[in-house]
Image (tube, rainbow, N blue to C red):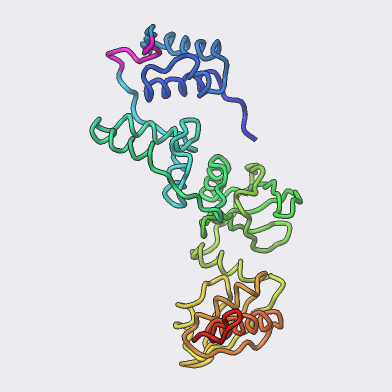
Amino acid sequence: MRGETSPTARALLALELIQGEPGTTAERLAGRLGVSERAARRYVGILREAGIPVVSERGRYGGYRIGRGFRLPPLTFTDAEALGLVMAVLDGHHDAADPTDPVGSALGKIMRALPEPVAAHAEAVRRTASAAPDRAAARPDPGTTTALVQACSSHRRIGLAYRSEAGSEWTVDVEPWAVVVRHGRWYLLCWSLRAAARRAYRVDRVLGVTLLDETFDAPAPFDPVALLEEHLAAGWEYDVDVVVEASADVVRACLPRPLGAVEPLGPDRSHVIGSTSNPVWCAEQLAVLPAPYRIVGGPELRSCARDLGERMVAASGPRVLRGGPAEA
């Protein structure tokens, strides 16, 4: 749970806003900080008491500015800001122009540290460029992600407060192995002490992280992404059991890992076995295979593959015009 922002932190944010927008009025500063004008003036007073020359100019174009002779402090980031930048690179962040957002705050510091000609171009892009949001992405809280990453690095057990997709909430103690980004979603790959089994939790559904005293031995070197995808391919309600007339290497290159494990049955034959919660998606993935295949197990998958095949055959046939003959 996030605590309230301290007066000092708000004063520093006020400093960033004034530096970024010279001439900012008390009214505008209050609006950006989400406080009253009286409070905004109090934060300016805190800055002046700290020796920062905040100048107030009257008139139509007046407002707060930083006086001459003030030198910017060394460029430093908070953990949330630093991780927020990494997250922005990995999955695209759409709050980069908001100075109250960790990424927007960190980006503002970088802009002020750049040479003016470079900063002008970068700031123009920052203010005018628009990104189409990835609706499938689920961006977690940077503070929560920071706590999980630190627990993974220090091999400390943690208590997780979690909310499932259905809305159920529970707590569980886990040994965190790795934080993995997959298709715009962030996962914690871990070992559940209660279930004595490997688990993957969505980081955006983590409600709280409690660092425990116990440590654990990290597992042997492993590929976190491969292990996560292997985990996500197992334990679902519909079986996937397919024999493909192609080598395992060819099949692995064509199918996404979460569809199932690929085992060789010979030089030009392989076996795909796993499970899925979406047999329609599974049938669509199998359709791209460049070789014949046969669905051995999974009646739901067979039904979806049959429906997909019928639609494709119908789409490739002649088109019938209303009130007229078929059009080739």
Magenta residues (range): 60-70
Decide which of 186, 193 is in the foreground and name it.
186
Q: Is residue 64 magenta?
A: yes
Q: Residue at x 76, y 51 (%)?
A: 168
Horizontal and vertical percent position of residue 90: 44, 52
Left or right of residue 161: residue 119? left
Decide which of 40, 172 is in the foreground and name it.
40
User: From what the image shows, is residue 249 above or below residue 165?
Assistant: below
User: From what the image shows, is residue 265 above or below residue 150?
Assistant: below
Label count reads 0
Per the picture, the main secondary structure of the magenta-coloured stretch is: loop
| Residue extending farthest top | 58
Horizontal and vertical percent position of residue 274: 63, 77
Decide which of 212, 124 is in the foreground and name it.
124
Left or right of residue 193: residue 283? left
Q: Residue at x 46, y 21 (%)?
A: 12
Decide which of 185, 315 is in the foreground and name it.
315
User: From what the image shows, is residue 32 above or below residue 300?
Assistant: above
Q: Residue at x 45, y 77 (%)?
A: 253
Horizontal and vertical percent position of residue 302: 67, 84
Horizontal and vertical percent position of residue 296: 65, 88
| Residue extending farthest front | 323
Q: Is residue 41 magenta?
A: no
Quadrant of the image for the N terminus? top right
Q: Residue at x 52, y 87 (%)?
A: 264
